[in-house]
Image (tube, rainbow, N blue to C red):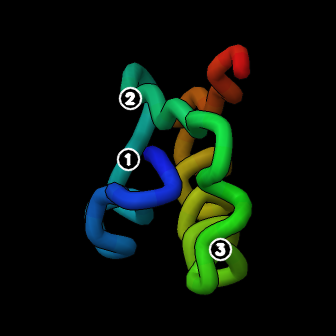
Amino acid sequence: MTEDQTPALGDIRLMRSGDVLVLHPGATDRMDWPRIWDAAGVAFTRGATILRAAE
């Protein structure tokens, strides 16, 4: 996920064990970041891995 591109929120929510969501620099600056973070929390509880890419 980047400042300019992100998967659909529904796709993020469906992530599960074995899936990886990578947050690149600038991703948290998006206007829709709170909704994305909520979806990422659902994915995390389903077992997905969430990583922050190096700057």
Q: Secondary structure at mark 2?
A: loop
| Contact? badges 3 and 2 (CB < 8 Å) | no
Q: Position of residue 37 (x, y in %)?
A: 67, 66
Q: Which residue is mark 3?
A: 33
Q: In terms of sequence position, does the residue under pointer 3 or pointer 1 come before the other? A: 1
Between 39 and 34, the one lying in front of the other is 34
Between 37 and 44, the one lying in front of the other is 37
Q: Quadrant of residue 12?
A: bottom left
Crowding around mark 3 (Cα neighbors within 10 Å: few <14, some 14 to 19, many 20+) is: few
Crowding around mark 2 (Cα neighbors within 10 Å: few <14, some 14 to 19, many 20+) is: some
Describe residue 7's horizontal placement relative to residue 24 as left or right: left
Question: Distance between the Cα atoms at labels 3 and 2?
Answer: 20 Å
**Three-letter amino acid code at the position of disc 2:** Asp
Q: Position of residue 48 (x, y in %)?
A: 52, 35
Q: Residue at x 71, y 80 (%)?
A: 34
Q: Secondary structure at mark 3?
A: helix
Q: Secondary structure at mark 1?
A: loop
| Contact? badges 3 and 1 (CB < 8 Å) | no
Screen quadrant of the N terminus? top left
Q: Quadrant of residue 13?
A: bottom left
Q: Residue at x 64, y 21 (%)?
A: 53
Is residue 31 depicted above or below 49 in this figure?
A: below
Q: Position of residue 49 (x, y in %)?
A: 58, 28
| Contact? badges 2 and 1 (CB < 8 Å) | yes
Question: Distance between the Cα atoms at labels 3 and 1?
Answer: 17 Å
Q: Which residue is mark 2?
A: 19
**Three-letter amino acid code at the position of disc 1:** Met
